[in-house]
């Protein structure tokens, strides 16, 4: 048996010479598993994996259908009761020319992957040929089903509406953000998310609708995390033929690395850059350098607590035209309202129970934080809209603050005083007010310095 294993292996090495790296990785798994199945009744002709008779029946048809290439093969175990299932994805070579000399050996190699997967219990196989066509085989039955993402299916997924990201046109993007499965399907749960993502594009559209500038639209994503929203926007803009640049900023190196890799994978290349930085310390020059100019649009999605305020401060400092902000875990004011002095003041100004009761105080803190953010942005010259981002049944973090610059105001012109008075009355001091006040004071000092420097020196006699 040992001899037959080794001779089989050399034959496989020959056949698989051109396999992509991902397949080559699982080739060694295949041989490892092969040894386990060596006692099987029927063995594969070039290695020791047990052949599923039903799968062998499907093989000729699969080979014929796959000879012009495929994007990926997905081997899955049947779903367990909790909905999870083991899966192995093997990237394919993409489309192959009719006379490509590698075609036959690549298909043979894939069939061996399929056998190995089935032997390991991954019996449900899908072969994605392109964005519209896939083949499905259940190794236990061996029937090859051809699936097509035809107009009717596309329409059903889109819920009868014309959506920005069509499942046939934006499959790579939808897969990268986890809405479309590797095998090209969209689960019922993700069908909802699919509609939400498209709804989001519509909420953002006023930011670029009617734009006349020849310059690319420059977007900064503050606390970008895995940058899903940014990728969705880049895709929507690409489909509309609007040139765009993106700079994603996040504290965490791992998410920045992942975002870079995903941007490359989606072909955004030089269009998208990412930096590791805290929003509190990020310099405007770094933003301009990263984007090749001043940002037009700042987005910030679920930046934790006061990180949202740091994002808004940066956006205002940069003088962006539009801000899209979905705040998250607004805990700062609830903490402040819990302190005796603030409790007494806010209690006197509002309904006392909303400050005394912990749960109500938390909700009040969130509401006041966002209310004051709206007023502070208005004080800096922005017009605000507060919208529902996604249905509240999906997430409680569903508030979108959409701001558009109505007037270009210098910090000295910001009308922060009325908001400051209101905050004093309530005994709160929100982060956004503190940071904007600091900027206004710095600007006032700089102006004073300029005036002092410009005044003519007085002689003792004058
Ligand atoms: C909940 S995640 C949201 C990520 C992404 N925007 C999204 O909605 O999927 C919050 C992200 O904010 C980042 N973050 C929190 N505070 C930050 C700060 N002060 N400066 C930069 N990034 C920050 C975290 O590292 C994390 O990636």
Image (cartoon, helix red, strand yellow):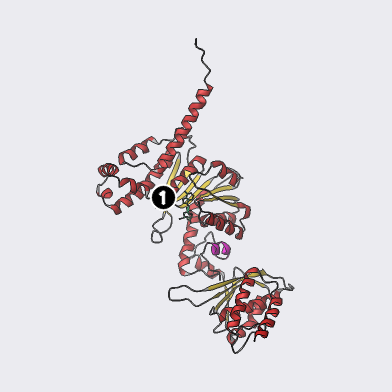
Q: Secondary structure at mark 1?
A: loop
Q: Position of residue 62 (x, y in %)?
A: 63, 79
* Residue located farthest toward the top when viewing the structure as drawn: 461
The residue lying toward the viewer, choosing from 436 and 180, is 436
Local packing at callout 1 (Cα closer than 10 Å; few below 14, some 14-19, many 20+) is: some
In magenta stretch: residue 66: no
The x, y position of residue 331, in whole percent, is 37, 50
Quadrant of the image containing the N terminus: bottom right
Which image quadrant is residue 421 in?
A: top left
Determine if the magenta segment contains residue 169. Answer: yes
Report the side of 400 relative to 2 (left or right): left
Point out residue 410 in the picture as x, y percentages from the top left corner.
48, 34
Give the x, y percent position of residue 372: 38, 44
* Residue 447 vs residue 322, the one in the foreground: 447
Identify the magenta region.
167-177
Residue drawn at x 54%, y 60% as measured from the top left: 165
The number of callouts visible is: 1
Quarter assignment of residue 418: top left
**Residue at which label 1 appears:** 305
Q: Is residue 440 visible?
A: yes
Query: Could you tell whether 410 is left or right of 216 in the image?
Result: left
Residue located 47% across and 63% down the image: 193
User: Would you place residue 179 above or below residue 106 in this image?
Assistant: above
């Amino acid at each position: 048996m040992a001899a037959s294993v080794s001779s089989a292996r050399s034959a496989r090495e020959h056949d698989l010479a051109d396999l992509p790296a991902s397949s080559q990785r699982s080739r060694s798994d295949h041989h490892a598993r092969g040894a386990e199945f060596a006692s099987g009744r029927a063995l594969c002709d070039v290695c020791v994996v047990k052949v599923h008779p039903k799968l062998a029946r499907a093989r000729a048809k699969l080979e014929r259908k796959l000879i012009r290439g495929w994007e990926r093969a997905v081997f899955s175990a049947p779903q367990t009761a909790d909905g999870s299932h083991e899966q192995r994805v093997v990237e394919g070579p993409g489309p192959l020319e009719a006379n490509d000399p590698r075609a036959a050996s690549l298909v043979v190699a894939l069939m061996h992957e399929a056998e190995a997967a089935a032997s390991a219990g991954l019996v449900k196989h899908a072969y994605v040929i392109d964005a519209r066509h896939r083949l499905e085989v259940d190794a236990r039955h061996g029937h090859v089903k051809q699936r097509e993402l035809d107009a009717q299916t596309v329409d059903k997924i889109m819920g009868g509406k014309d959506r920005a990201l069509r499942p046939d046109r934006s499959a790579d993007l939808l897969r990268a953000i986890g809405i479309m499965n590797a095998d090209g399907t969209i689960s019922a749960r993700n069908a909802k998310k699919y509609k939400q993502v498209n709804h989001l594009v519509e909420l953002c559209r006023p930011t670029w609708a009617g734009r006349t500038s020849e310059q690319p639209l420059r977007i900064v994503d503050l606390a970008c995390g895995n940058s899903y929203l940014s990728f969705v926007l880049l895709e929507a803009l690409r489909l509309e033929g609007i040139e765009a640049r993106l700079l994603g900023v996040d504290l965490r190196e791992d998410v920045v690395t992942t975002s870079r890799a995903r941007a490359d994978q989606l072909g955004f290349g030089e269009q998208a850059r990412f930096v590791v930085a805290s929003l509190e310390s990020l310099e405007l020059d770094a933003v301009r350098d990263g984007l090749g100019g001043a940002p037009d649009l700042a987005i910030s999605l679920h930046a934790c607590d006061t990180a949202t305020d740091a994002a808004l401060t940066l956006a205002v400092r940069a003088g962006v035209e539009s801000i899209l902000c979905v705040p998250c875990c607004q805990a700062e004011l609830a903490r402040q309202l819990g302190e005796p002095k603030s409790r007494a003041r806010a209690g006197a100004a509002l309904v006392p129970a909303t400050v005394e009761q912990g749960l109500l105080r938390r909700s009040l803190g969130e509401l006041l934080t966002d209310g004051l953010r709206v007023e502070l942005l208005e004080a800096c010259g922005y017009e605000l809209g507060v919208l529902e981002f996604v249905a509240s049944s999906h997430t409680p973090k569903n508030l979108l603050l959409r701001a558009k610059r109505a007037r270009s105001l210098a910090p000295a012109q910001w009308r922060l005083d009325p908001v400051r008075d209101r905050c004093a009355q309530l005994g709160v001091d929100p982060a956004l007010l503190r940071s904007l006040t600091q900027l206004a004071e710095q600007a006032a000092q700089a102006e004073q310095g300029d005036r002092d420097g410009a005044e003519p020196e007085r002689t003792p006699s004058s």
